[in-house]
Amino acid sequence: MCGRYAAFLPADAMAALFQIPSPMPNWAPTWNMAPTRSAPVVRMHPELRERRLDLLRWGLVPHWIEDLKETRQPINARSETLASTPLFRDAYARRRCLVPADAFYEWQVSDDGKLPWAIAREDGAPLVFGGLWEGWRGPDGTVIRSFVIATTSACPTLRRLHERMPVVLEKEDWPLWLGETQGEVSRLLRPSAARFRIWRVGTAVNNVRNDSPALLEPA
């Protein structure tokens, strides 16, 4: 599960990490990325066949829908059914993307309510989630490019917080996920073997209007 995350890696560092040759968009760092906001996403340009980093809206809008208001716009997609669910099947086959993050949040239900936890890689490297993207054009010409984050079963370290976790891809997995190389993509849809750091944070992250480095300070 992934409902909030932090993405504050500078643009130049992100360009170097993903080897992006094209100009980078401008975006503000965030410690509280929430659904419907625009986030940096790495994808293959369908015509140039090179990596691009663009700002896409979090919450998938399938290209074939007609009424935007009447359509579910999921932020997560279960990896076990990506290839069979009509909502994700086409994007899984043709429009996979990478979603960079520095940490993500999970909430644990307790007697004191829902307590937020932050999760990051123990080695300090950025997290890179497997995602799917879509482009939608409305009758009035409005264009929405959006994405969804794939999820899988939680690894043992994270299972005490939630049974699901984002699909976390290693650098050697990126070419296959983006379609730069051929192979069995489904083998990447597994719990991450990376080591994770987990720490309790304050409840300020519960409010999407709060957005500062203080959100990641230990409670």
Image (cartoon, helix red, strand yellow):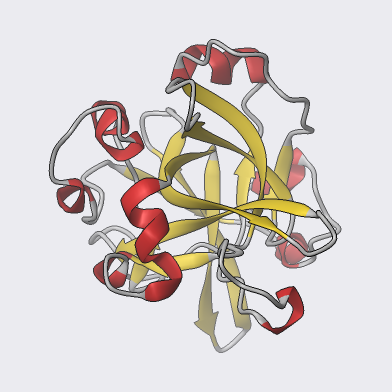
Q: Quadrant of residue 127?
A: top left
Q: Position of residue 129 (x, y in %)?
A: 42, 45
| Total count of labels | 0
Left or right position of 85 against 133: left
Q: Is residue 144 visible?
A: yes
Q: Position of residue 162 (x, y in %)?
A: 39, 72
Q: Position of residue 106 (x, y in %)?
A: 52, 64
Name the residue located 13 percent from the left edge and 45 percent from the top edge: 184
Front residue of this view, candidates 131 and 198: 131
Left or right position of 172 against 215: left
Name the residue located 52 percent from the left edge and 16 percent from the top edge: 20
Q: Image quadrant for the N terminus?
A: bottom left
Q: Image quadrant for the C terminus?
A: bottom right
Left or right position of 23 against 159: right
Q: Is residue 198 visible?
A: no
68 shown above or below 149: below
Left or right position of 58 against 140: left
Name the residue located 57 percent from the left edge and 61 percent from the top edge: 63
Q: Position of residue 120 (x, y in %)?
A: 46, 43
Q: Quadrant of residue 159?
A: bottom left
Front residue of this view, candidates 65 and 17: 65
196 shown above or below 113: above
